[in-house]
Amino acid sequence: MSKRNKCRSNKQLNGQVVIITGANHGIGKETAYQLSLRGAKIIIGCRDELRAENAIKEIVSLNPNANIIHIKLDLSSLQSIRAFVQQIYENETKIDLLINNAGIGADTEGQTEDGFELSFGTNHLGHYLLTLQLLPLLRKAPKARIINVSSSVYASGKINFENINLRNGAFEMWTAYSQSKLANVLFTRELAKRLGDNTTISAYSLHPGIINTEWYRHIESPVGKFIAKNFTKMFAISIERGTQTTLYCALEESLDNESGFYYENKYEGDTRLDGQVVVITGANQGIGKETAYQLSLRGAKTNIIIGCRDELRAENAIKEIVSRNPNANIIHIKLDLSSLQSIRAFVQQIYENETKIDLLINNAAIASDIEGKTEDGFELIFGTSHLGHYLLTLQLLPLLRKAPKARVINVSSLAYASGRIHFENINLRNGAFNMMAANSQSKLATVLFTRELAKRLGANTTINAYSLHPGLVDTEWYRHIESPVVKFIAKNVTKMFAMSVERGTQTTLYCALEESLDSESGFYYEFSIRAFVQQIYENETKIDLLINNAGIGFIPELKTDDGFEMTFGTNHLGHYLLTLQLLPLLRNAPKARVITLSSGIHMLGKIHFDNLNLRNGVYDHQEAYAQSKLANVLFTRELAKRLGANTSINAYSLHPGVVATDWF
C-alpha cells in the first residue's frame, strides 16, 4: 500500500455515463478499468484507434462485464473534437463524469491542426472546447463531475498572454508544458466560479504524480529521452497508484460540496507526539524540513533534533519552521553522514542531552554523477545514504529501546528495485561507477537494512523499522550533479512531474504516526498485498476459506517490486504475507481453512538459504519453481504447527496435477 492513499469509496456507478480522454494507456486506461468495475458505461476518446481497441480488449479481459466503447478523438483538432461531441449527443442523454485525462509533452516545437502551440492546444484548449461543448449533457445528470488531470508543474507555470503560442524562439518544453497545466487549474477554478453555487456540476483538477508510463515517448532528443526514461524508473509510482487521486475526485461523496479545487494527497491521522523526542537527518530542506515542521505540530514539548551538515541552512530551516509554528521545539546538531567521526560526535551529544528517542527518521541522501569518496574512503553515495545511517541507527539503538514505542524510518526510493549490492566491488571503483548504479545500490541497501534490523530486533521488541519511497519531490535533489546536461534535464523533469514537498512528506508521516503499523516492522511502503487486505477488512468480518491458488513458473530471471526472485516472491512470499495478514479474519470464522496450491515438483526442491533469490548466475527456472513450491508445503506445515491443536483454522497444501492451463 502506499500513502498516496488508496481511494476508499465503495460508490457504484450503475447507469452512469463516463467519458475519459486519452484512455488507451497509462492512468487513463487504468481509470477506465477501475470505473468499469463500478457499473458505469465508459466512453474513451483517443486519437489512436488501434491502441484504443487494444485497451478495450485488455479491460474486457480483466472485467468481462465492462461496458466500454471508443470514439475517435484528436484533441489537437477542433474539428475532431466537434465530431466526437456530435457522436456523444447522438447516443447519450446525459454525462455523469467527464475526465479530461489526455496530455502531451514534447521537446520539439509543434502546432495543432488549428495553429496553436501543440502542448497548450492539446492539453488545455482541446479539453476547454470539449468541456464547454458537453456542458448541456453534464447539466442533465443529477450530479456531474468534471475532472481535469493537471500536474504540480502548474505552480511554476506562467500564461504567456503576449505570446501564448511561444513563437519566435520562445518555445521550450517545460515552459509549454507548465503553461498548459496552469491553464488546466485556472480553467477548473473559473469554470466552478461561473457554474455558481446552485449548479449540479462540480469541477476538480489534480496532480496524479510521476507515473510509470511512457510519458516521454514524444521527446525526440535521444539523450533527453534516455535520461527521462531512467528518471521515471527511479522515481515513478505504479499506474494503479497514479489513478487514486482521479478515482478520489470521481467517487468521493464528501466532495459534493467542493468545486474548483486542486487535489493533493495528505495523511490525515491525528496521532499526537506530546513529550516525544524525534531525530531527523537532512532536515534543512525538502521533505526533511517539512517533516520536521509537520511533526512539530503534533504535540507540546515534542523535541525535534535535526542533524545537518550545513549549519547555516539548518539555522535558516529552524527559523522558517518557528515562523510557521511558534511553539516548535526544534534544535540543530551538526551531522555529516559522510564522516564516521561526525556521526559519533552527533551521537555523543544526543546521549548527553536525551534519555530516549521515540522517532529516528533517516531522511538525508545525496545524488551525484561524479565519483566521490567519503572521509573514510567509501563511495560517496553508498557511504552517505546507507553506511552513515547504518552506523547512526546502531549507535542510537539503546536510546530507542528506552522509549515505550520507537520507530526507525528509512527514506529509500523506488530505485532500489533495479539495484544490486556489488559485493565484489562495493565502492564501484575501477570504472564501475555510474550515478544510477550507485544510487540504486544505496537505496537497496537501505531496504535490506530495514528488513534485517526488524528481523534481528525480534518479535518482542518495542522498536519498529520501516523503509519507504516518498515519490519524486520538488526539492533540489539534483544539486550535486555536475554535468550541465544531466542537471538541466533532472531539474526540469522534477519541475514537470514532482509533487510538492508537503505531499512528499505523507508516506514518512504515515510511517511515523499511523497506529495500525504497530504490528508491522521491516516492510517497504509501496505495496499491493496490503492494499488488497485493507479492502478485505473494510468489507468483511470473517473469512471462511482462503485459497492461495495464484502462481507463476518457468520464466526468465526477474525481480518482484520488492527485489525478490520473481517465482519465489510471487508463489511463496506473496501468499505468506497475505495469509498472515488475513489470519484475524480467518479466526473470526467458526471453522476456516487455508488451502495453498503447491506441486509435486516440491519434492525436487531445495530452499537456498544462502542465496534465496538465486542471484549471481545461480538462477534456473526449474530450481526457482521447485524452491517456491517446497516453500509452500513447508509454510503450510509450520502454519498448522503454530496454530496449534485448539485452533479453528486448518491448513492444507496440495498438488493439483498437470492441468491444461496456460501455465507455460
Image (spheres, rainbow, N blue to C red):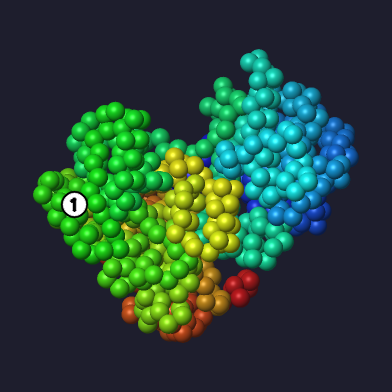
Of residues 586 and 263, the one drawn nearer to the viewer in this rendering: 263
Say which residue label 1 marks.
400
State the image coordinates of residue 148 (x, y, percent, origin top left). 66, 36
Q: Residues within 10 Å of mark 1 (few under 14, many from 20)?
A: many
Of residues 69 and 333, the one drawn nearer to the viewer in this rendering: 333
Left or right of 165: which side holds 554?
left
Give the residue at x 52% y 68%: 551
State the image coordinates of residue 77 (x, y, percent, origin top left). 85, 43
Of residues 611 and 630, the one drawn nearer to the viewer in this rendering: 611
Give the residue at x 78% y 28%: 132
Of residues 565 and 195, the one drawn nearer to the viewer in this rendering: 195
Residue type of the residue flagged with mark 1: Leu
Above or below, comparing residue 637 to residue 471 in the picture: below
Give the residue at x 48% y 56%: 478
- Which quadrant would residue 653 be assigned to in this image? bottom left
> Which quadrant: the C terminus?
bottom right
Q: Secondary structure at mark 1?
A: helix
**Can see residue 598?**
no
Above or below, comparing residue 221 to residue 288 in the picture: below
Left or right of 621: which side holds 137?
right
**Can see residue 244?**
yes
State the image coordinates of residue 498 (x, y, percent, origin top left). 53, 48
State the image coordinates of residue 286 (x, y, percent, origin top left). 41, 46
Give the residue at x 33% y 63%: 384
- Which quadrant would residue 224 be assigned to in this image? bottom right
How many numbered discs sit on the rendered protein?
1
Left or right of 265: which side holds 380?
left
Above or below, comparing residue 176 to residue 633 in the picture: above
